[in-house]
Amino acid sequence: MEQLDKIVQKESQLKRDMRSRHMFMISIGGVIGTGLFLSSGYTVNQAGPGGAVLAYVLGGILVAIVMMCLGELATAMPVAGSFKTYAQEFISPSVGYLSAWLYWLNGALTIGGEWIAATIIIHQYLPGVPLWLWYAAFAVIYLLLNITAVGVYGESEFWFASIKVIGIIAAVVAGLAAIFGWTGHPAIGATNYVGHGGLFPHGFTAVLLALVPVCFAYSGTELIGIAAGESRNPAESVPRAIRSTSVRTLLFYVISMIVLVGIIPWQQAGVNDSPFATIFQVAGIPYAHLIMDIIVITSALSAGSSWTYASSRLLWSMSLDGMAPRVFSRLSKRRVPVPAVLFTLAIGTLSLWIYQVSPNTLYLWIVSGIGLVAVLDWAIICWAQLAFRYRYLREGGDVSKLAYRTPLFPVLPIVGMILNLTIAVSLAFIPDQRIAIYAGVPIIVLIYLSYFLVRKRVGASSSCARLSVPESAE
């Protein structure tokens, strides 16, 4: 392996103790959360049974494209700054700055969204316990998990994410049993697929509009890029994690949705309860609703913890580049960015206050906002990979020596950019989610304008050195 360039060296202060299985489960922990367990009900309600499944298929294909672009970048330059650093280096410092702050804000909002989702379920069982007490408990748990050594965090996330994977598999098996009548009760059959207006009761336009909450559901797969900065052997572990996460996430979501829409009539689906808990209930499993709710709560907290990890590492990387205050570049004795963790958690709690003011709309607002930021950052990832490959070729690089190569170049990154930007524009045509445009666009403009106040510090850190990348082990 050749000497990595100075960008990798600059971000090499973090301890590289992340194993391949940790990276995979951190990504699974980020992507399989309330997007699947709660907001999937909203997608079914808006798009119908066939529309929901198709939307998750299309979203999964889009995610696979983005992950293939990210895979090439993360193996060539395994840094905690991930796509922020790639955009800064291969597109422009201003785009890197915008991507960094958007994604950090995305992570902070997701933390609050996962807490809200968990308390929606907990409140059904313990309505007398103040919500702020649960939020305080979640904050303590997140803090303890994220200030430990990265190897300890990775191991804990591996087991937390394993719980939700087991829960999904169990729900799929129980749902199939109910659909085919293997539970001792009459089979549900295809009633909910073909009845109540058919597979596409709102037409194919609803499928396209459903892609926004679907992108929220899939957001988190890109956490692999950030975890690469603490991977023991990124040239081997990152490509393996990229492939397994893309395929398994698509399978988890699509198969789960096929079962879910067969169990629950699309008119009854929503975001105020877990549709997966309903699957167990319909299957007639004793205490299944309680068991599934516990799994969903664990899932929400696991996803939020993954986002706390990713956002704090990103904020740490931003401080090194002059994009954020220098205080966030401080590391503990375990080489963990504790100030960045504390600040990320503090900002994440702000959304909880808004939820107290407007509990019936905030969750969907967060879904829309995160979906908007996700597709914008995914477009930037595709753009950065395109720019990276062209620069690599201009400098005489041999593509066969890349540890991971994005297939069908340049078609895939271009298609990924176009599709992601199209989905972002579609927010303007969804009344319930148009708030993401009204709130998101001014924030994007303000963040971009603020770049010009710090551009001297940011520009000074941008490298124009020749590329030096890990060679393929093939």
Image (cartoon, rainbow, N blue to C red):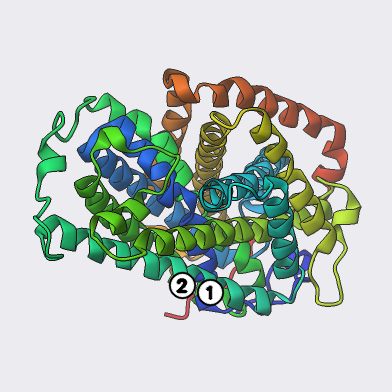
Q: Amino acid at mark 2?
A: Ser
- Element assignment for label 2: helix
Density class for disc 1 (Cα within 10 Å; few <14, some 14-19, many ≥20) is many
Whether residue 199 appears in this view of the structure is: yes
Quadrant assignment, res 99: top right
Q: Quadrant of the C terminus?
A: bottom left
Q: How many marks?
A: 2
Query: Can you say whether 315 is above or below 155 in the image?
Result: above
Q: What numbered label is drawn on residue 158?
A: 1
What residue occupies the far right of the structure in this picture? Answer: 327
In 3D space, how far apart are the residues under numbered discs 1 and 2 (Cα atoms)? 6 Å
Q: Which residue in the structure is indicated by mark 2?
A: 162
Q: Secondary structure at mark 1?
A: helix
The reply to whether discs 1 and 2 touch (Cβ–Cβ < 8 Å) is yes
**Residue 312 on image: x %, y %:** 73, 57
Do we see residue 244 in this rendering? no
Q: Position of residue 60 (x, y in %)?
A: 35, 50
Residue 261 drawn at (x, y percent): 24, 45
